[in-house]
Amino acid sequence: MTSNKAGYHSTVSRRDFMKALGLGGIGLGMAGMAPAIAPAAFKDLDEVMASPLAESKRPSWVKTVEKPTIEIEWKDVKRFDYHNVMWASGLRRALGDEQYNLSFAAGAANRKLWIMENKPGSRLQDVAFNSANNWAPISFLGPQSSPTPESLGVPRYEGLPEENARLVTTFLRMHGASHVGFAQLETGTTENLIYAYDTGSGEAQGPRLDILDVDVPVDNKEENYRVIPKKARWVIVYTMRMSHELMSRPTTAIGGRSHGYMYNLKSLLQGQAQNFLRTLGYMCLGEASTHNALGIHTGFSIMAGLGEACRVGHTITPEYGMQQRVQMLITDLPLPPGKPVDFGVHEFCRTCKKCAEYCPAKAISMDTEPSWDNGGEFYRGSGVKRWWLNEPKCRAYMAMVGGCATCFAVCPYSHTSKASWNSFMRSTVAGNAALNGFFRKADDFFYGSGISHDPALIWEQDHIPWGYE
C-alpha cells in the first residue's frame, strides 16, 4: 500500500497504519491539555500531525540564530563523566567524607527540628507532601512492552523529518511535555554533550557510554557499558513545567516537591515515549536515572532552541523562565534539528544578578562577565564561556536544608509571561539591552524577592491543577 499524500513516502498509509495498531478512530481528547484548542477526536496520523498542538509557536520577539548566545569552543568541549556530578559521587569527593557526612546529618537534624517546631513549609504534612515520590521503572532501552511493526505484520512507519517532528511533538505534549525540540548529534560538536560515563547506582561508577557504528543499542550490565548506535543521530529534548506555587516556597519541604514530582512524571513519560517509538519501528534510548543522565540537558536544550542559558547555568525559556525540568531521549527517527534562540537572556543576566544576590549559599557568581574557567573536574561545561555555579557549595547547602531552588523563585523570568507587564518586559529586553537595569529594579518593585513568606498558605488556597499560575 502507498499513500497518495504529497510528500509522504510510507509503504503503508497512515490511516491503515493506525488501523493495524488497533488505533483507527481512537478519540484523543485534548480538553484541559491546551485550553486554546477545542476538544477534538483524532481519526488518524494525518489529523494528529495537523493538530495545532504539534506546533511550537514562540512569541514574536524570540529570534532564531545560527550560534547560541553563550560562547562555545567546541574543540575544547570534552565528554564528561556523570560520576563527578554533585548528585553522584562528586559531592563526597569535593567535600571529603567528614564534611559530606556532617552536611547530611545536619539536614536530618534540621528536618526533625522543624517538624517539632511546626515551622511553616517544613511541618510533618509538608514533609509528607515532599516525600510522596513514586517512580515508574526507567532504563536505557525502555520497557519494550509495546508491539513492534514486525510483530504486527506491518512495515515500520516512514515520514519526512518535519512530519516526524509533528508526530513526536504531539505525542509528548499530549502526555505532559511543555516544550519539544530536536538536536542532531554531530561528531566533534554536539556528540561531546553526551556523557562519557552514564549515571550509576548511588555513588557507584556508571557504565561507559560508547557511540559506535552498530545496528542495535547495547546495555551490558555485566561489563558495565552501554552503546549508542551511530545511526541514532537525533536527540529529542523536552521540558516538563514546574509549579509556580511550589517554586515560590524554596528551602521548604513544600518547595522541594516542585522538582520531585517532575522527575516522577518524567519516569512515566519516558517509558511511554520509548514504547511509542518502538511501535513505529525505531529505537528510543532513555535515561537510566530518575534524574538526569545520558548528556548535558542545558546544552541540548540550547542547541534545540528551547531557550537560553542563564547565570545559574540552567535553561530559561521565553514562556516559563527556569520553571521547567529539561529531559532528553536519543532516537534513529529522522528529525529536523532546531536552531538556538536569542531573546535577550544572556545580556539581561549580565546586569540582573538577582539570583546571585538572593542565593543563600552564595554559590552563584556575581561577576558581570562570564568566564572560560569552568572551576574544575566537577563541572560539566568545559569549552563554554559562562557564569560558573559553585556546585559543591550549592549541593551541600541543599543537603543541609532539604532542598533550595531560590534562584528559580527570584528570577524575573519566572513570573508568567502572559501577564501584560511580564510580556512587555520580555519583549523589550529582547530588543533593547539598555533597559535591563530598569527592568531589574521594576521586578524588585512589583514582586520583591518572588518568595512566598507564608508557606503554610499552600494548604489554604484554591489551586488549579499542577499549581500553575
Image (cartoon, rainbow, N blue to C red):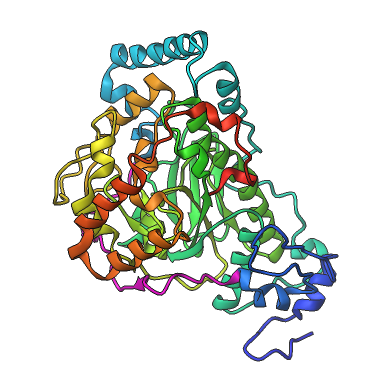
The reply to whether the magenta stretch includes residue 454 is no
Tell how many labels.
Answer: 0
Q: Position of residue 31 (x, y in %)?
A: 73, 61
Query: Outermost residue, front direction?
Result: 445
Residue at left offset 83%, top offset 66%: 26
Q: Say whether residue 55 is left or right of residue 365.
A: right
Q: Quadrant of residue 303?
A: bottom left
For this rendering, which residue is in front, 233 or 136?
Answer: 136
The reply to whether the magenta stretch includes residue 63 is yes
Q: Position of residue 110 (x, y in %)?
A: 42, 13
Magenta stretch: helix, strand or loop mostly: loop
For this rendering, which residue is in front, 417 or 447?
Answer: 447
Q: Say whether residue 333 is left or right of residue 437.
A: right
Q: Say whether residue 456 is left or right of residue 196.
A: right
Observer able to see residue 274: yes
Residue at left offset 49%, top offset 64%: 181
Observer able to see residue 233: no
Residue at left offset 40%, top offset 65%: 305
Residue at left offset 49%, top offset 21%: 120
For this rendering, which residue is in front, 249 or 147?
Answer: 249
Query: Which residues, given as a range, are shown in magenta?
Result: 54-80
Q: Position of residue 64 (x, y in %)?
A: 36, 73
Image quarter of the N terminus:
bottom right
Q: Say whether residue 33 is left or right of residue 367.
A: right
